[in-house]
Image (spheres, helix red, strand yellow):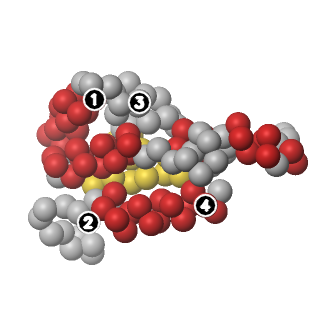
Amino acid sequence: MFTILMILMLASSMGFSQTVAKKESSENFLPLSVWYSGGKARAPMLSPITENSAAEWRIDLQKIKKLGFNTVRTWVEWASCEPREGQYNFENLKLLCELANEVGLKVFIQMYVDSAPDWVGKKYHDSHFEA
């Protein structure tokens, strides 16, 4: 889990983070957000990318902006982002952030680490969740 958090922090410093064209004072920013993870995804998933994703998500985000929201919330699920140990996939998150920035929306990313990838249970036998 520490590794994925470090990767996300590094990724945000390399351009995944939002930079809004017009400068807003953080003192005056009041987030009005709606949950969105691309397409028809349900929490905690991000929609897989298809050939139509960019166009469809852009339209959705433009509608969200037009409705008066200034922020979208999305989830990052560990199992989806690191399906194999050390192999990370943030392409859908990157696309969502780029499109949101394009239409003038900020993005809140919620980390969802309850869903560990299958490889974690195989490698660390004592890591299974017990209720």
Q: Quadrant of the N terminus?
A: bottom right
Q: Position of residue 121 (x, y in %)?
A: 78, 41
Please name the amino acid that badge 1 sits on. Answer: Ser
- SS at circle 4: helix
Residue 53: numbered disc: 1
Q: Earlier in the sequence, mark 3 or mark 1?
A: 3
Residue 3: numbered disc: 4
Q: Residue at x 23, y 63 (%)?
A: 19
Report how many numbered discs are placed on residues in the image: 4
Residue 33 in sight in this render: no
Task: Using the image as rendered, state which of residue 86 and residue 20 is in the foreground.
Answer: 86
Q: Position of residue 35 (x, y in %)?
A: 39, 40
Q: Residue at x 26, y 65 (%)?
A: 29
- SS at circle 3: loop
Please name the amino acid that badge 2 sits on. Answer: Phe
Q: Earlier in the sequence, mark 2 or mark 4?
A: 4
